[in-house]
Amino acid sequence: MQKFLFFILGLSMAFLFTSCADDLGILENQENVQSSLTSSLKKTCGSHKHMQNLLDNPEYKSQRDVRMAAFNKLKSNASQKTLCGNPTIIPVAVHYQGISNPNASCLIDLAKRQVNVLNADFQGKNSDINQWINNASASFPNINFGETCIKFCIADQNHPTGYGISNGQPAITINKTQGDQVNNWSGYLNIYVQVGTGALGYAPLGGAGNGDGVVIEATAFGAGQNCGNVGPEAPYNLGRTTTHEVGHYLLLDHIWGEGCNIDDDVADTPSQGSENGGCPIIGIKSCGTVDLHMNYMDYTDDECMYMFTNGQSQRMETYINSSLAILKNNAENVCSEAAQNGSDENSGDNGDGDNPDVCDTPSSTQVDQLTEASAHIVWKGTPGAKKYQLMYRVKGASWKRVKPAMPEATIEGLLPDTKYQYRIRTRCDFGWTPYTAIQTFTTTSGSEGDGNGDEGDSGAENNLTVEIILDDFGSETSWYILNDADEIISQGGPYRDGIRGKVKRKDIILLDGCFVFIVEDYYGDGICCKHGDGSAKIVNSSGNTVVESDGQFGFYDEIGFCIQNGSVKLGKRKADVKSKNLARKSLNK
């Protein structure tokens, strides 16, 4: 997550952070900045110093006072949770500055990946939010993660003249601008990517939309493949420096404010004595409370920050609505519908939350060549994949694995006329994705075979359908089916908000055995009945219900069941208590 290295002159000790250090004079030797900057920077955000310099200008201070007055007036009317069917569009322009031998195509792809990261992080749809849901949230019973109702869009229409960008092309410039404010680009959230900044990034605490923006060090920008001397370097390689700095631009201070007695002005963030760096263990305390060091506004490594709070999301939404109308009003002019959908994690026809531009679990797997001793397996690759992992075995035996770089692999040394199981996952910048559902193939007997295999040795196949009726907040809903080895063999969601009553279906095949059907709500209020009559069930080919959840739970509903030749026996149900979570939510109002 965002990183920022505190270098204090005269001391040899450096502190890590993501987007802001209190002093831009961080590096002792400025000449070495362009060489492996991130490895020496560690964690530096220059936002506080930058803000002090801005406020020294009386005209700027006067204009900011107006923005803050508008914010404070609207702040009192901010609601605890609102339906996000129509997110506010924020037009983005990315400006690379001082780049030697630029690869334009690569830099454009890098910028798009960074905007995808922003959308996932701010909307609470980042893959690693599960670290909060499944682990960290238990240490913070009065805090819900934020789902900010905004969408960042790289503008593609009506560009300012003089930058060589035509309609339909993304608002990405290379060596065409200088500095951290370009008046021609008013009405955009500008991201200025610079080499040798002396910090990982900085931004004003509450932007103006007048051509200002956030500044990001080139070695902390984006995610995935680098473009020469531009691109993310570990441990700041997941795009969280930009998440942190954009948080500043939308009026979020560092999570610790200025220490135990000076808050960050967000009600649901606990008091914290100072910044945290690296990857702290959950449970460390300062100011008498557990530190929320996994928050994007701390200074921890990219892989160890993964959430905003609900209060932070409300604060950012309020600031946009009160003080950044220039961005909202410009969005329709500069962001086509195609550009908006291009960064939308819910784009696509299936409405299942799949984003074709985001690194994800492989799809469309098949065995296209099969012999008595080998199988060639292919699948649809995914953008940003570092490699894949293919696991295979005879059922009941230990898994074996291969790690191909491309979306295909040949398995050799197999037994003839034998049924094998296989599954595949992707290695992304954020870690491994979930596996695909387990599939099977049967090697030939030595003469011929079509790869479909003998279905009789592992039990009957049961054709089933998972049906999810959504409430208003489909983006909070996901489901999983686990086998008796606690492996995910099928899953779905999250879905779109604002389509209450919509039924989502997915056909699945389960071999005879025992399973667990899990339905999750990331907010903790189930899917029925305050925001719609949501429910979930599995039905057989005759339309009869096999397993059912009435949607009245908290964070999860787990139902065990066994199926044998079409006959179903229900097992234990374990559901999170909804009433407790609703009471907890009321504490955050």
Image (cartoon, helix red, strand yellow):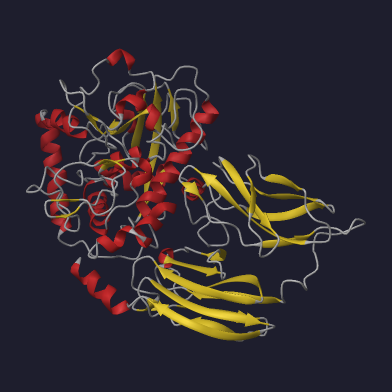
Q: Name the image quarter holding the C terminus.
A: bottom left
- State the image quarter where residue 448 is shown: bottom right
- State the image quarter where residue 137 is shown: bottom left
Q: Is residue 576 above or below residue 93?
A: below
Q: Position of residue 288 (x, y in %)?
A: 12, 55
Q: Is residue 154 visible?
A: no
Q: Name the image quarter holding the N terminus.
A: top left
Q: Nearer the viewer, residue 143 or 109?
A: 143
Taking the spot 73% from the left edge, 50% from the top edge, the residue there is: 377
Q: Position of residue 238 (x, y in %)?
A: 41, 40
Q: Is residue 486 left or right of residue 47?
A: right
Taking the spot 56% from the left edge, 43% from the top edge, the residue there is: 383
Judged from this view, the residue extending furthest toward the front is 397
Q: Position of residue 336 (x, y in %)?
A: 48, 46
Q: Is residue 384 left or right of residue 246?
A: right
Taking the spot 48% from the left edge, 53% from the top edge, the residue there is: 345
- State the image quarter where residue 300 is shown: top left
Judged from this view, the residue extending furthest toward the left is 261
